[in-house]
Image (cartoon, grey):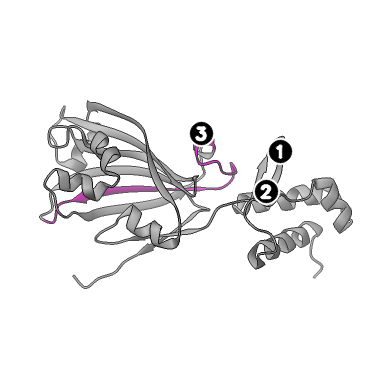
Amino acid sequence: MKRENWTIIRDEISDDIRSGRLSSGDQLPTETQLADRFEIGRHSVRRALETLAREGKISIEQGRGTFVADTPRLTYQIGKRTRLRRNLIPQGVDVRSVLISAQRIVAPDHVAQALLLTKGAHVTESQRITLANDLPVAFGRVYHCAERFPDFAERRDVLGSTTETYRSFGIEDYVRQHTSIYSRAAKADEARTLKQHPDVPVLVVAAVDATPDGTPISTSRVIWSAARVTFTMEHSDG
């Protein structure tokens, strides 16, 4: 069966990226140049580029051009002890978690339930964005009991890791108690925050961490770019 013109362009550019003939940050020819090179219409070129953008392989920037995306697909392992830095740094990725805002609020019902707090209890809500090689890969909110962890967000910024922050509160170890993941279409503001094509989906990860005796210490909801992460599940006998 004869292939459609646009798939020929898509496959050739994909092969060039995979083989290293095109590297992260390289600028692609213009639509007109690609149309001339492949001797096809600009509509087919546009369809091929849109498909590659949805796959996260290229970035179409209005007014600048089309570039090979600097979007290494990360592997994030979810298990009994799930740690951001331990997961991503060994993959040769420069990982940063940047605090956007922090505030003390009355716990929403689902947060109070997850943390086993009474109705009306206060929590600290921290909003953070995670960058890998300066590219946004995830953002979301994490909640802690305000009585037990009154300045968690501030300490986290000073100490540089969640594990060290818990240690500063006397907690030497913590485990993942619950994780749920589902995918959906990205909302417009989410696509802008993640700097991804509007048609690329996101993965919504809700989690509860607890001390080894089962006492919940945090609950979170994080939006991940589906084009930039693969989640794996760790299985153990324990």
Q: Secondary structure at mark 2?
A: strand
Q: Are marks 1 and 2 in contact (CB under 8 Å)?
A: yes
Q: Residues within 10 Å of mark 2 (few under 14, many from 20)?
A: many
Q: Position of residue 73 (x, y in %)?
A: 51, 58
Give the number of the mark in front: 2 or 3: 2
- In this view, the mark in front (3 or 1): 1
> In the rendered structure, which amino acid carries the disc numbered 3?
Asp
The residue that label 1 is drawn on is 64
Looking at the image, how many numbered discs can be counted on the residues? Answer: 3
Instruction: Please determine whether, in this image, residue 220 is positioned above or below residue 119.
Output: below
- In the image, residue 4 lies at what x, y percent? 79, 60
Q: Disc 2 designates what residue?
A: 67
Q: Which mark is residue 189?
A: 3
Q: Secondary structure at mark 1?
A: loop
Looking at numbered disc 1 in the image, what kind of residue is underneath it?
Arg
How far apart are the alpha carbons under marks 1 and 2? Answer: 9 Å
Residue 40 found in image quarter: bottom right
Foreground residue among 169 and 148: 169
User: Residue drawn 34% across and 54% down?
Assistant: 85
Residue at the spot 56% in from the left edge and 44% down from the top edge:
196
Residue range of the region highlighted in magenta in the rendering:
192-212
For the N terminus, give its image quadrant.
bottom right
Q: Residues within 10 Å of mark 1 (few under 14, many from 20)?
A: few
